Amino acid sequence: MKLNELLKIKYPIIQGAMQDVAKVGLVAAVSNAGGLGVLASGQDTPEQVREEIHKVKELTDKPFAVNLMFLNKRAPEIVDVVIEEGVKIVTTGAGTPKLYMPKLKEAGIKVMPVVASVAMARMMERCGA
C-alpha cells in the first residue's frame, strides 16, 4: 500500500513537527494542500493540545497528525487527549511509544515514530508501528 493511501492524503508528503512552527495555520494549510500536516505538541499542556486540535479541525476536514514528544512529562495525558479527540495519526519523538502503543493501536491510531536508523525502525515496527 502506498503511503498516501495508508494515510488518506493526496500526496505522500509529511510536514515536520517543528516546535513552535508546526502549529494550527501550517498544519491546516499542509493538510488542505493534500499532504499530512503534523501538529507539534512539544511541552504544551493537554489543554493546549486539545485547543490546538479543535482549531485545526475548524480549518480542515483533511487528515492531520499530532506529534507526541515523550520528554514532555504530560505525555500520558496528551495521549489520552489525542484519543479522545479522534486524531487518527500520530508521529512520535524524543522517546519510544512502546508504553502507549497498545492504547493508541486499540483506538485505531496509526503510529509513525521518527527514528534515526534502520535498527530503530525495526525496533519500532516490532512495537507495532
Image (cartoon, grey):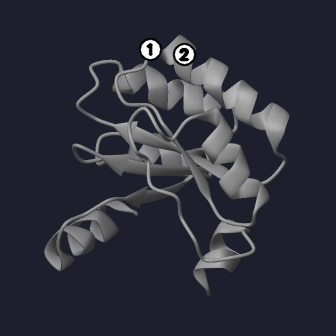
Vertical order, 51 against 62 (above or below): above
Amino acid, disc 2: Gln
Give left or right: position of 66 versus 118.
Answer: right
The residue that appears at 84% across and 47% down in the rendered structure is 61
**Residue found at x 40% / y 39%:** 68
Q: Residue 48 carries which label?
A: 2
- Disc 1 crowd rating (10 Å Cα; few below 14, some 14-19, many 20+) is some
Q: Is residue 71 left or right of residue 24?
A: left
| Drawn side of residue 21 relative to residue 5, left or right | left
**Could you tell me residue 56's position as x and y percent?**
72, 35
Whether residue 29 is visible: yes
Amino acid type at circle 1 is: Thr
How far across and down, in percent of the image, does residue 40 sit?
A: 46, 38
Q: Which residue is drawn at 72% across and 69% down?
A: 9
**Where does residue 93 sit, x and y in percent of width and height?**
30, 47
Mark 2 to mark 1: distance in Å? 5 Å
Tag 1 secondary structure: loop
Q: Name the residue under label 1.
A: 45
Q: In this view, does 114 lie to the left or right of 91?
A: left
Tags 2 and 1 touching, CB below 8 Å: yes
Q: Is residue 63 visible?
A: no
Q: In the rendered view, would you say 84 is above or below 99?
A: above
